[in-house]
Amino acid sequence: MAERVVEEVSNKQVILRDYLSGFPKESDFEFKTSKIRLSVAQGRIIDPRNFDGKLMKRLIKPIIGYGVARVIDSGHPNFKKGDLVWGMTGWEEYSLITEPETFFKIEHTDVPLSYYTGILGMPGMTAYAGFYEVGSPKEGEYVFVSSAFGAVGQLVGQFAKLKNCYVVGSAGSKEKFTSISVANFKFPDHDFCCFKHVLFYLCFPDGIDIYFENVGGKMLDAVLLNMRLHGRIPGCGMISQYNLEETEGVHNLFCLITKRVRMEGFLVFDYYPMYPKYLDMVLPLIREGKITYVEDIAEGLENAPKALIRLFSGHNIGKQVVLVARE
Amino acid sequence: MAERVVEEVSNKQVILRDYLSGFPKESDFEFKTSKIRLSVAQGRIIDPRNFDGKLMKRLIKPIIGYGVARVIDSGHPNFKKGDLVWGMTGWEEYSLITEPETFFKIEHTDVPLSYYTGILGMPGMTAYAGFYEVGSPKEGEYVFVSSAFGAVGQLVGQFAKLKNCYVVGSAGSKEKFTSISVANFKFPDHDFCCFKHVLFYLCFPDGIDIYFENVGGKMLDAVLLNMRLHGRIPGCGMISQYNLEETEGVHNLFCLITKRVRMEGFLVFDYYPMYPKYLDMVLPLIREGKITYVEDIAEGLENAPKALIRLFSGHNIGKQVVLVARE
């Protein structure tokens, strides 16, 4: 039996120095270069989104996040050398994947590979599941999206427009609105606006049918007062509340009763079996230019910590991506 | 054409002196005796539950609430003299009903008439709609009911037992549990307990599938931490928050997301078309003694304010009813 020669290369990694409290800062991260025997991924684009310092059990491991990678070597029958995949990888140049069944093979490469960390990956499926499955939208309804220029929110807004809904989004800064307009964002100006504090009585004189919840806290409280009868609130995230020592209290939940509102949290993992159906819907829309996706790309693994910090300070515009290596 | 002689009688009424802030007290009420030409109801049992001082537009009118009444005179084709009905009446001896289409005719009189303010009326339909329609219970699930000895809660608990669920209820005082046990309450002791502060980790080591929400505020916050994956919270009421100048903030809503919980408010009015179906289910259960209903009856309209005040202080045991006149 011929012995296989396995190449060993150096592998740059991003590691947390310690458990975090509060928002991350650059000094919380360190870079390490270790050795790895090539057995899985190379040339990856990593995604700093899926990150929770508190959940990291072993700080000696790199941070994890969604990434796109090419298979270098595989013992799994579904993956072979050269395949492109997306799934949970480490913040590093090469990763050894121990749960390959959680990965999706990339079949369509006529679209940017980075899309598989966004519109064609977890955030895309999140928007799809949350809006269509949890939100149960009807034609012409009034839809409000918070974090509307983020990885998920920008898609929810566009899905809602495609459903002939009236859509208003909010974002952390006026900048985002301007930059995204410049980037040929496809929301018609007349009904897509951006505010630090949304003026609901101006935007929704008749109230809100669907609130796609990304923010939580005070925003949720304000929205509750403006919901319509039988409204729905798909609960996707509450980014304003993460990393707070104590979360803000929500005071207006009684509106759920008087207005018969359904508030339902969801996690994308439950909906991954619908991924092929989602691709069938969204790929033609991308190719025909009927949907666009704005990315904020940081080049180089060494810029990953900064990219993550931008996310929490609200400075990213669109989906935050870190380009680790080009094809 | 023979002229009809209409009898005019004196009519005792309970009226609010002024708009309320905070919890009601006896000095907020006054009794008035007016004259009424007999055209609708006599011998009614009124229900102080549906009461909100803030919503009363004209304080010269008596307080309104659900009541059982006998028709004295009627111009409506569906109601004739002598019919028994239930619906929204005034806190008074005789009421002129201007929206008779909102009333239900009482067809079954082998059960106590007061039941039509409770198990066979609005609270019964509320428990039915909230538990079965909004809660979507499955056999053997873990159910928690707050205000478990109130007009609605005591039924939810029994419906859940009939569905082979494990049920725990909470109530405002240990007294209630004792009194209701004495009253031959049908919950088996081993899994129905009562606490001022429920110890969830003891009662629900595996978490809660359905929380029937009657209380809100801190109770809801504690429950959220103990919900199971894909749990449901039918939002029926939040009595701990009524009459507070500022409501308590709820901090643990992020649990809705991580646990994919559906919290859905409902109002019984949307479900009244199901009333005949509900009667078909519940009347046999009452007749066979498979379900019981505990009432706390105050005699005399002059005791109605006290009865209402007891409701907010948590001193009522079971459905609070005021007996205005016997048949």
Image (tube, coloured by chain):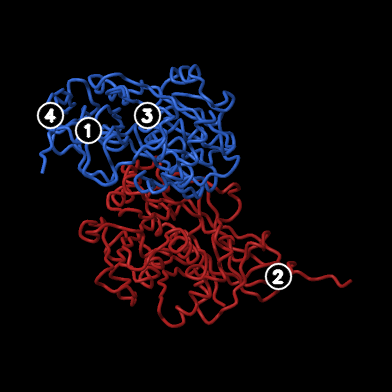
Chain colours: A blue, B red
**Residue picked out by circle 4:** A8
* Earlier-in-chain disc, 1 versus 3: 1
Nearest to viewer (mark 2 / mark 4): 4
Q: Which mark is residue A113?
A: 3
Residues under numbered marks 3 and 4 in contact, where contact means CB atoms less than 8 Å apart:
no
Q: Amino acid at mark 3?
A: Leu
The residue located at (59%, 37%) in the rendering is A164
- A309 on left or right of A172: left
- Quadrant for the C terminus of chain B in the image: bottom right
Nearest to viewer (mark 2 / mark 3): 3
Where is residue A266 drawn, in percent x and y?
A: 38, 46
Determine the CA span between mark 1 and mark 3: 18 Å
Where is residue A147 drawn, in percent x and y?
A: 42, 30
Determine the CA span between mark 2 and mark 3: 69 Å
Q: Amino acid at mark 2?
A: Asn
Callout 1: SS: strand
Nearest to viewer (mark 3 / mark 4): 4
Where is residue A14 drawn, in percent x and y?
A: 19, 26
**Residue picked out by circle 1:** A90
